[in-house]
Image (cartoon, rainbow, N blue to C red):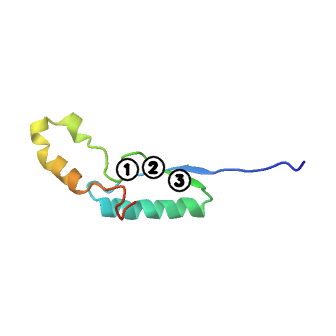
Amino acid sequence: MTPIHAFTRVAACHVAPRFLSAQKTTEKAISVVNQASRNGANIIVFPESYISAFPLWSALRPPTENHDLFRRIVHESVYADGPEI
């Protein structure tokens, strides 16, 4: 029997998003995906909240000071059927 030599190269992308900009973060992700693919990656992964970015400010500032930032993050959110996906 011939041995099977199957390899999977995974790229775990640890890159900063373009904060509060779904369009610019998506463009950056596409660039990173292309680079990882050129380097032989078969699977390319990003953190779960990469495009929208994690709202770190919610842990650092009082909630009453975060309303403007939450409005912006909602505005920059992506939908499962949106163009970013």
Question: Are discs 2 and 3 less than 8 Å apart at CB?
Answer: yes
- Residue 41 location, x and y as percent? 60, 56
Quadrant of the snapshot with the C terminus: bottom left
How many angstroms separate mark 2 from mark 1 (CA)? 6 Å
How many angstroms separate mark 1 from mark 3 (CA)? 13 Å
Q: Residue at x 50, y 60 (%)?
A: 33
How many angstroms separate mark 2 from mark 3 (CA)? 7 Å
Q: Residue at x 45, y 63 (%)?
A: 30
Question: Are discs 2 and 1 less than 8 Å apart at CB?
Answer: yes
- Residue 29 location, x and y as percent? 42, 59
Residue, disc 3? 44
Closest to the observer: 19 or 77?
A: 77
Residue, disc 1? 50
Check disc 3: other Cα within 10 Å, few if <14, some if 14-19, many if 20+: some
Closest to the observer: 67 or 31?
A: 67
Q: Is residue 80 left or right of residue 74?
A: right
Q: Secondary structure at mark 1?
A: loop
Q: Which mark is residue 12?
A: none
User: Disc 1 residue type?
Assistant: Tyr
Q: Is residue 77 left or right of residue 1?
A: left
Residue, disc 2? 46
User: Disc 3 residue type?
Assistant: Ile
- Residue 76 location, x and y as percent? 25, 56
Q: Secondary structure at mark 3?
A: strand
User: Disc 2 residue type?
Assistant: Phe
